[in-house]
Amino acid sequence: MSRVVVVGSGAREHALTHALARQHDVVAVPGNDGMAAEGLAVADASVSSLAPDLVVVGPEQPLVDGLADALREEGIPVVGPGRRGARLEGSKVFLKEFLAEAGVPTAGFHVCATEAEAEAALAQMRPPYVVKTDGLAAGKGVLVTDDLAEARADVRAKLSGEAFGDAGRRIVIEEGLAGVECSLLVLCDGRDVVPLAPAQDFKRVGDGDRGANTGGMGAYAPNAYDPTSCETAVETIVRPTLEVLRARGIDYRGVLYAGLMIGERGPMLLEYNVRFGDPEAQSLVGLYDDWGDLLARTATGELAGVVARPRGASVTVVLAAHGYPSFPRRGDVIEGLGSDGQLADPVEGVTVYHAGTRRRLDGRFETAGGRVLSVSAVGESVADARERAYAGVSRLAFDGMVWRRDIAAGIS
Ligand code: AMP
Ligand code: GLY
């Protein structure tokens, strides 16, 4: 049994830790109160002081900051790219220029640093207008709107630094694409790739895809539409990306998450993330058994010949705090969780993963962040998993709870 350290404190890291703990000695750094409640090890320590055999980095920020490079220098295998590879997510400007070089299908774009440049770019576009913050913005840096006045106001807020500080001082204005979205997560060992089941994320806060963009309000996998588009995307998008990374001397070992728009022109790349998606990970973990082996092979460059076959389906519903995504309220007591942080009244196939929760002195949990809990279910079909996930949701409550009723609705 080897020791795995999972870096992060959200529901994604809870799901990975929970899955890996079936076969390995796992420590989450720093982890969260929900992990601790179910008996998973958490530590507020430096990663290397835990002497890991494998490190899995959950969030993008430590990757952008170079955590994977530092660990590799110590000889520790890591799932997650180094700083240079992480720029695919860390800078939209870098990404778009990279994609142009790699010949990857993506929306036409302009890079703008001044309002005058942005105005000229908008004048060439037709609605919907798409305005993206260059730097990291916790999944909230993208505006898609048909309203030119709103696009202009967003440009001003971003370029002035008001909206996202320095992350928004350069922006990308790009062509609006139509189609269906798909999250294609691929394990990459620098050379070989193993695609995981395509997933769908629900980014808007409200039912029917209305309201503000969020980090993700729910997900399901495998996603319903044609698998051939995902096979195409591996060939036209993922492999050319890895080739250019290699040509630049970047040994990309980790998850490459391709946010795809599948429309009339075939799959096109909206964005890359350099890590597992949240909440996609919560659903994907339930579809495979041996995460330890898959992730170790990713980190050590041994994915050649590996095929990951998903079993069944999974649906995840996110419960967010009152006021999410703008001003999430903290301190609302969560009803329906037992002392282990799981459903007090369990539903078969359902696991609750914690994100923005805090354990109070009286042992109960309260809200302590925007996305509070992920209720994730596995089942034989998406419909079956969906029924279970919502049965789980119905057993939980807190004041002002925000959740979508239509995650994976109508999918068989
Ligand atoms: P991103 O962070 O770049 O994936 O953007 C967040 C969300 O904005 C995506 O999941 C899409 O729903 C939407 N989006 C981004 N770029 C475009 C585009 N070029 N056309 C239409 N929608 C987009
Ligand atoms: N669910 C979208 C993300 O993780 O970025």
Image: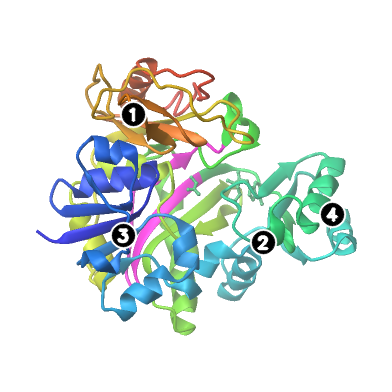
10 Å neighbourhood of mark 3: few (<14), some, or many (≥20)? few
Quarter containing the N terminus: bottom left
> Mark 2 sits on what residue?
134
Task: Give amino acid for label 2.
Answer: Asp
Indicate the amino acid at tag 3. Answer: Ala
Question: Cβ–Cβ below 8 Å for labels 1 and 3?
Answer: no
At a point 65% along the width and 50% down the height, the residue shown is: 141
> Which residue was labeled with disc 4?
122
Q: Nearer the viewer, mark 1 or mark 3?
A: 1
Q: Nearer the viewer, mark 4 or mark 3?
A: 3
Q: Callout 4: helix, strand or loop?
A: helix
In space, the residues marked 2 and 1 are separated at their CA atoms by: 41 Å
Residue at numbered disc 1: 361
Please name the residue that numbered disc 3 is placed on: 45
| Mark sitting earlier along the chain (2/3) | 3
Whichever of callouts 4 and 1 sits on the residue coming sooner in the sequence is 4
The residue drawn where x is 62% and y is 34% is 327
| x and y, in percent, of residue 179 in the image | 60, 43
Identify the image quadrant of the C terminus.
top left
Question: Residue 205 placed where, x, y %?
Answer: 58, 31
- Residue 249 vertical placement versus 181 (above, below): below
Residue 236: in sight, yes or no? Answer: no
Q: Nearer the viewer, residue 221 or 86?
A: 86
Q: Is residue 103 left or right of residue 390?
A: right
Q: Provide residue 316's location: percent of width, then percent of height.
A: 38, 33
Of marks 2 and 1, which one's residue comes earlier in the chain?
Answer: 2
Mark 4 and mark 2: span between their CA atoms?
A: 17 Å
- Do the residues under discs 4 and 3 have CB atoms within 8 angstroms? no
Span shown in magenta? 182-203
* Image location (x, y in percent) of residue 111: 75, 66
